[in-house]
Image: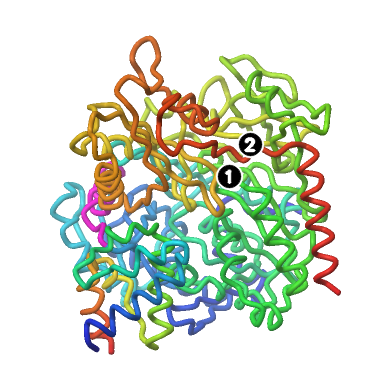
Amino acid sequence: MTDEKVLGLIREALFDVAPNRKEEFEGIQISTTIEDLALDSIATMEMVGFLEDKTDMTFPDEELAKVASLTDLARMMRAAA
Amino acid sequence: MQTSYRTIAEAIANVGEAWPENGFVFQDSKGEEKRYDFPDVEKETARRAAGLQSLGLEKGDRFGLIVIEPEDFVLDFLAALRVGVLPVPLYPPMSMGSLDAYSDRTARILETSKAKVLVASEKLQNVLWNLVDRVSTLEKLVRAEELGKDAGTPVYPEIGPDDLAFLQYTSGSTSDPKGVMVTHGSLIANVNGIMGPSGLDMDPAVDKGASWLPLYHDMGLIGFVIAPIVWGVEVVFIPTMRFIRRPRVWMDTIHRHRSTATFAPNFAYALITRRCKEADLSKWDLSCLKACGCGAEPIHPDTMRAFTETFTKGANLPETAVLPAYGMAEATLAIAIKNVSEPMRTIVVDAQAFEDDGIAKAPETDDTVILEHVLCGAPFPGHEVACFTDDVRLADGVEGELCVKGPSVTPGYFDNDEATASTFRNGWLHTGDLGYIVDGEVVITGRLKDLIIFNGRNIHPQSVEWVAAEVDGVRKGNAVAFSRPGANSEELIVAVETRASDTDALTTEIKHAVQREMSLSITQVVCLKPGTLSKTSSGKLQRRKTRQQFLNGTLGAEGSRAMGSNADKVTLAKHVAKSLWSRAKARVLAK
């Protein structure tokens, strides 16, 4: 899965959990941190649920704890694929 | 009905014989279900109890419990209660990018409780190893799945109602965590209130629970593990993170299992109402669900009405299902629950009389600005709730600190005499909650100690303020954090004083810092000129006043940016019109 493909999926997930911030999320990069997304913990996990459903993968809870940026998230998605 | 058991240990030992057909069903993170009939629960907890003893743990010793899967959490926890070993339930690392803050808090709690052993999910062992070095009392890290593998049979010590069952760390800041000492006796008294006719009125022959609530929190642990074991009621457990990722699994599970009772904080009802789709609703039949308890954070009547409307119309939820409840860990769990056979009720009061004088008074004209408060029912039999200000007991309808008395009240905080003495005074538990009593029912209106409850999490404003005040550009010690009612949960607002000209950059910095340190997202940062935050004569920041100014739109007075009134002010006439409209709309949609 290329960075672009992963970013596309993440964007889609973000539009779904926080539709009112669509414009802001258009600009995310692979280097964007989870902190930059400024989502609360519930919305963060909803985003994960969306990604899991879209890709038919399951990300282990303990792996999620180590994710700090979209680069990490992409790496985890590749590992689970 | 009341239970005849004196301790939870007795209840676990007998549940298999009393209700052999019922049991616990555990979902894993993929939704696979595994069932333990109560006789299996009895056997499995005995085996794991022997396992705890083989680790050298004796009656009264503490151990940390950090387990993701409900199956191992519940069985290890109940095993400990059978042999008088005290679990300290802790939350697992869950959200992304906040491992350091998590480790600090967890280490502090383990240290304070003097835990000797840490029992944790196998998957978490890597993440948690550093705690063994950091916590001086900790001797071992043990896999939750392997407890009691080859341990033989346990030796049951004498356990009485006054003995401690576990420590519930809930309130308190990171630096000074407070562990509520929950006894077997207070648990039994509270379970009688929750499950008996004054509470959910549960019958093990027909009733079943369903819960995704975290098990390290009193609502999930006492409400859905301990109370059902004492009563013999079947429960299905959904892993918390499974629910958060896919909120719809909650109602889907209830539909499939024909569950009759569930509980959640306000935010979860907002989440499920927002997330469910027409196709889900038409698939679900929730006519079985007689109790949707709501507690642990402020209850917004609009959220609960929207939930009731959506699910009554779409999935046959009984109109009386929503049950506002009031409680706190220091009173074991619950103190009052709305009657199961009635719809949720609210009371409308004159906003000005209430905000100025703390008096709940009926509005006089249609133009009166009003506040709407939720009625949480009468205290359980044998328990009392009263309102006090400066140790003077107040009349009905007058706002003060809610204080609680009765057999569910715990003896205090573990190894913390100072905190115990300030909270448990003159025979009353001082809850720190503001509210009033009307016709014997409890109404909660706010919090004395400015605690912010965010998606069910208790946040001390000080901890947010400390982080905000560390950001370059914020005047030292001049940050105030508070909440405002939001659409789903409360929303976090931070007001700071600054001389910085680029307030947008400062706002971003503050938001990032709080996100990084505490995994909290701030809804709005208010940047103010130096000298504008309200202070007492001794120079202490006034959080309540600042919040009120913010809600009124007067914070920072003239010239401050983007400060329009955020208060959700509604007049009586508008309120009546609004509720008539929503009823009419419901009727039209039903046709």
Q: Which element type, helix, strand or loop, lies under badge 2?
A: strand
Amino acid type, mark 2 = Ile
The residue sitting at the left extreme is: B133
Q: Nearer the viewer, residue B464 or A1?
A: A1
Q: Residues within 10 Å of mark 1 (few under 14, many from 20)?
A: many
Q: Residue tagged by mark 1?
A: B298
Residue B98 belongs to the span the image colors magenta: yes
Whether label 1 touches label 2, CB < 8 Å: yes
**Main secondary structure found in the magenta portion:** helix
Which quadrant, please, contains the N terminus of chain B? bottom right
Relative placement, left or right, of B238 versus B22 is: left
Q: Chain of mark 2?
A: B
Q: Position of residue A32 (x, y in %)?
A: 23, 66
Q: Nearer the viewer, residue B348 or B218?
A: B348
In the displayed structure, B87 sits above or below B174; it is below
Q: Residues within 10 Å of mark 2 (few under 14, many from 20)?
A: many
The residue sitting at the front extreme is: B559
Mark sitting earlier along the chain (1/2): 1
Q: Position of residue B250 (x, y in %)?
A: 57, 72
Q: Residue tagged by mark 2?
A: B444
**Numbered range of the magenta stretch:** B97-114
Q: How is the image coloured?
A: rainbow
